[in-house]
Amino acid sequence: MFQSSCRRRALALATSVALAAFSTSLAFAADGYQTPPAPIAQILDSAPTPGVTLSPDRKVLAQLGRENLPSIAAVSEPILRLAGYRINPRNNGPIEARANWLNALSFEDVATGKSRPVSLPAGARFFGPSWSPDGGKLAFVMDAKTGLELWVADVKTATARKVTDPVVNATFGAGFDWLPDGSGLMVQTIVDGRGAPPAAAATPTGPTIQESKGRAAAIRTYQDLLANAHDEALFDYYFTSQLTRVSLDGKTSAVGKPGIISGVSISPDGQYLLINRLKRPYSYLVPANLFPTEIVVTTLDGAPVKMVADRPLSDNLPAAFDAVPTGPRSVNWRGDAPATLVWAEAQDGGEPRKKVAIHDSVYTLAAPFSAAPTKLIDLDQRYRGVTWGRPDFALVQSRWWQTRMEKRIAIDPGKPGTGRLLLERNYQDRYNDPGEALVRRDARGQALLHFTPDGKAVFVYGDGASAKGEFPFIGRMALADGKVNRLWQSGAAYYEQPIALADEAGKSVITRRESAKDPPNYYVHALAAGAKARALTAFPDRAPQFAGVTKQTITYQRADGVKLSGVLYLPAGYDKAKDGPLPLLMWAYPAEFTDAAVAGQTVDEGNRFTRPAGISHLFLLTQGYAVLDNPAFPIIGRNGAEPNDTYVEQLVADAQAAVDAVVALGVADRDRIAVGGHSYGAFMTANLLAHTRLFRAGIARSGAYNRTLTPFGFQAEQRTYWEATDTYTKMSPFTYAPNIKDPILLIHGEADDNQGTFPIQSERFYAALKGAGATVRYVTLPNEPHGYRALESTKHTLWEMTQWMDKYVKNAPKRDAK
């Protein structure tokens, strides 16, 4: 009798527990897209803050209304994934998940503040705004039912009109550029009469075959590649364009022959075109930018002038990050000359691991392009570009990935072969960044160095990072020695970012100003001390529900002495004495460094205006959680060692220090801390759950978990799997799936387009975790890329995160001490 009674009570208890669990699972597994709790959904539904673009003459500020997040129906429009690109076949342009559509336009006079709206058709949506060289007009691409149209707005009349039918081919970008004299535009258009797209054969005609005959080709993990002959035919159909000269009155004339034109630029004098033209044979292993390419110069009417390069398929580049194709690359026009080409050529065969004194040489060649090229300078790093200024001065920049070092070199283009080193620095060093040279647009629309009135310096802009905060500045860099003298700097209460000098002499500046309480807006004011700023815009706070949230930058140390920091957010109305420790989410993204001192730099963010948008984890602050945002997770390679060889050990040390810091402050409950991240942050999350019990739960979005699936490098790892097998294995949380004892939420876009984060990464990781008996939830979002865009997907992601945190962190029972 006693045993029977006990058995009944046990059965009843088990049944009640099972029913409770079943009820909870039903609530959590609701069908369809879910909506997160208030006020998250309300913030997501609010209108985005407009964008702005300043005219080249600095006289007009164009305000651009922005569309909110697209619907899942829009994101689900047909997509073609071809040779590393994604396009919308309806309009031969960008897909909804990538396009940042604009929907309104107005012109504001900087001097008077007067704003005039531009009338556009109902439901207008456009992208790619581009100023004419004189700043009198703004061109953009307008979406239409059957394609993309080119429109031009006139500043003087504040009117806009269509200048082409829906024929713009925007597969490789906006698809147009202004002529230097502003008389018209060069447009890439759909080939007239191209007919219907090629249809796939109903019955296969044979297998798809790839073959390698002993030629080494270390291919990174690319997405959206060509897969068969039908893909090749589609690529030809959609990406072939006809260069067309379009006048402002809509008259058109074809330029040259149609082709797969991946890039085109007009010489500063308007006499020549520089064209990058792709050709067969295509590859199923690399994206289009590595296909065989002809780089040619033609007249403005399309007549051939000079073959600059005929580059073969580049599918055999070394895995190292500074690996480049051989032959001319980065071919561009010299901005301060009528028609002079400039390019770089590798002197190490494109293999950065070769021990040579010179890795790159830079060459120039002037019209009529019949002479031998002139060597401008030799570089012991990789060429990163030239900022042109005047006949006797330009700035060359080079970088070297392995050391994270960069150089800035002054050259006299009239005296090729020599240069003066102005600067050599670790480009990750924020505290000692002297800034970047400012440019101005000349009458032909070319970006040239902005010299000071005396001609002895150039104006520079810098972030002004320090331990106390980031305070952007305007300075002058002396041409003689590269030293920077700051002329103006943002005040302590504000983060005020210079957008452009408001006059040629550099006596006033246009800025984007914000503070902890003030939303970003644009101002103009003199650089003189004590000068008052004048507001150009008055954009409101789009998320006032977030106004009571507080934040502070906290600093702490790793066990080995490395200085760390993070931004601690606390919910509105939180009182530590009254409310005690909170459940907390730590959201991070590791970074690799070669210098511990640089890795430990802290920049206070107290003067920044923070509002969440999209799938931001900061929305959890509205649900009673604290958030430690972007805590430093440096992975440091000392004395030439590779950072990743001690990745797990350093990651654990970073996490331990962060947890100890927030607990010591009394704002976080050690037993109710979660960790999360997106992409490489998801990889970090899974590793921390595999190697520690510091966290009650994890949220991993769009991550990669098995590094054998990215064998030719990933993130900052440039060695192959076979060169660093042990590191790849130890870094993969997939290897340690049975060790994960705390709940983990996996979210992934079904159409992920990021290198290395194929959806199969989450799929197989889920299978491994499920097989090991872990508590895991796996959510896939239809038609979403690496970053989720649809409003429904965004709201559902935040609902999933909130539900997961509520169940496994906020309301979690005390964990066993084992």
Image: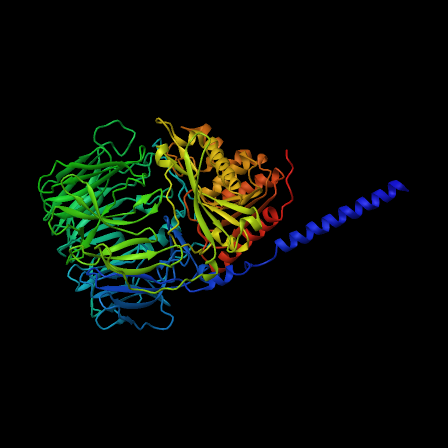
Q: Is residue 782 above or below residue 373?
A: below
Q: Residue at x 14, y 37 (%)?
A: 419
* Quadrant position of the N terminus in the picture: top right
Q: Is residue 659 left or right of residue 375?
A: right
**Tell me, what colour scheme is on the image?**
rainbow
Which residue lies most toward the right here?
1
Count the labels in the image: 0
Q: Nearer the viewer, residue 283 or 87?
A: 87
Where is residue 355? Give x, y as percent.
26, 26
Where is residue 420? Give x, y as percent.
15, 36
Q: Could you tell me if residue 574 is visible in this image?
A: yes
Q: Could you tell me if residue 190 is visible in this image?
A: no
Q: Is residue 433 left or right of residue 634?
A: left
Q: Quadrant of residue 466?
A: top left
Where is residue 463? Give x, y as percent.
30, 47
Q: Is residue 114 above or below residue 585?
A: below
Q: Is residue 492 left or right of residue 181?
A: right
Q: Nearer the viewer, residue 584 or 285?
A: 584
Q: Is residue 578 left or right of residue 394?
A: right
Q: Nearer the viewer, residue 799 or 779?
A: 799
Q: Quadrant of residue 165?
A: bottom left
Q: Is residue 708 above or below residue 79?
A: above
